[in-house]
Image (spheres, rainbow, N blue to C red):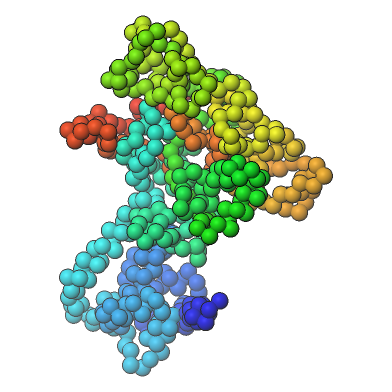
Amino acid sequence: MSITGLIFIVILLGNVPFFFIGLYGIFKKAGVAPWKALIPIYNTFVWLKIIERPWWWFFMLLVPGVNIFYAAGIEVELVTCFGKFSFRHHAMAVLLGGYYFTYLGFSDKEKFIGPNGVLPGQNPPKRSAVREWADAIVFAIVAATLIRIFVAEAYMIPTPSMEKTLLVGDFLFVSKFQYGARIPNTPIAMPFVHHTIPILNCKSYSEWIKLPYKTLPGFEKVKRNDMVVFNFPAGDTVVLENQAPSYYDIIRYTAYNNHVDYNAARQMLWSDGNTHIAARPVDKRENYIKRCVAIPGDRLQVRDGVLFINDKPAYRPENLYTPYSVVFKSGYVLPEEKSQELEIENISNRFSTLAPDHYVVLMTKQHVADLQAMGVTTTLEPFAYPVGAAQSPIEDIFPNDTAHYRWNVDNFGPVYLPKKGYTLTLNDSIYPQYDRAIRVYENNTVERKNGKFIINGQETTTYTFKMDYYWMMGDNRHNSQDSRYWGFVPEDHIVGKAWFIWMSTDANTDILHKIRWSRLFSSIHGRWAPKEKQFTE
């Protein structure tokens, strides 16, 4: 540690005891029993009474993020009681409160005047226009931060993983209070940005204070088919120069391209001087939005592209975008404008073995019926990767263990979703599904020796889960990076419930048709969720 860093820490830590000493002197000058300054929590209520601020401000001091503004506010109000109105004095109160309070409390030169720094019958000094604007801006930031943390947050659909339900260019609000607002893990952060400060490209948060996972009471639990915003579970580590693929997929690609194993590829990535790797806390990982198709305690499986929950066909969204195998009649070419009208996406380039007149396309069920009615096809049927067929040369399908699992996006599972309190019997074949949940999400050390499992230093044959887990999938099933690739979503990653679309724009059309007027102020779950209770209980 540098000398400068050491001096900073000494000053910071030394400020704490002086805080109580300074309050002791200030309370005495204010005509309050000075011993009250030495009792934590109680002294804050007394402090608020001295500066004539409401008692509920104390509870605002407990709200991460917001408490920074309120703490600074009551410090400024306290020095104002001594007639200190300048920016210099207020900055000293906020940055060096303990030391400055001690000076005010014990200096014979400083007299306690009273709230607002004026004697009875006098008016406080008029604040400058700059100060008035500064106060207004701080108030706006506090109010917006409170709303963003506890009520709702704006979100934009950046990728087509939820087509044709939620579209790229949809701007929506995400409700924080329905599932119970999550207290930020990193309360010291710049308002209105997620994890990176634009232009500067540096972290927007500090990990000096890290809080455990806690939520306020909610009105409901996450249900099947809710459209949920959550923090990307595999986003705990990122390659800053290439954040689109996950850090773990980059290692797998590195291993494949260099013909080495996973650990060697990881070492290659970390030793690359042009690569910068960062870890992110849960609340600063990328936000994803998907449909929650399975909840804790469910058994999930995909068979030939059809999703089953608890061995029953799952709810099929109205606009589900799925692949079809298409062969047109000899010599027929579908016009481009008709292809656009039917919203066909050609993904044939993913398959090298297709015949020249054979296509694999993504379509909704309604548009499939429209294409059939045209009478221009000889084959038009659902397409699915065969059982055991690999989609990619890398092991990118959960649980990334081809020794025990030969799954793909269309033939996947079965998988059991852990619920809090569920006890799993450990063995070599089942463990890969739950490895990351046990080690990373629930923060355990795991060793495997001679076929035995050692968790946190204790040999065991079982593990009991501490959290609930969810399974998220996109409605655009073949263009969605979802739980089939990276597994479970822990409860502490849940951000909120998609609420309503307030704006929707189409980047691929002219300015006169840029706004999708029919989507404005659409209730997301009122329009694209099942209307009746599911039968897969």
Outermost residue on the bottom side: it is 108
Q: Is residue 125 left or right of residue 209?
A: left
Is 239 placed left or right of 389 in the picture? left
Residue 500 pos. (x, y %)? 33, 36
**Residue found 43% across the figure and 38% down from its top:** 289
Query: Does the rendering let one see residue 128?
Result: yes
Image position, residue 195 (x, y; %): 42, 55
Going 60% across and 25% down the picture, which residue do you hit? 389
Q: Viewer-proximal residue, 288 or 252?
A: 252
Res 60 quadrant in image: bottom left
Q: Position of residue 505 (x, y in %)?
A: 26, 36
- Residue 344 versus residue 420 in the image, above or below: above
Judging depth in this view, the residue of 452 and 458 nearest the camera is 452
- In depth, the one of 535 and 444 nearer the eye is 444
Q: Quadrant of the N terminus?
A: bottom right
Can you say which quadrant of the picture contains the C terminus? top right
Q: Is residue 45 above or below residue 416?
A: below
Q: Is residue 50 at least partly visible in the picture? A: no
**Which residue occupies 39% across, 14% down?**
368
Q: How many marks?
A: 0
Q: Quadrant of residue 298?
A: top right
Q: Position of residue 174 (x, y in %)?
A: 37, 42
| Horizontal side, residue 25 vs residue 420: left or right | left
Residue depicted at 44% across the width and 80% down the height = 98
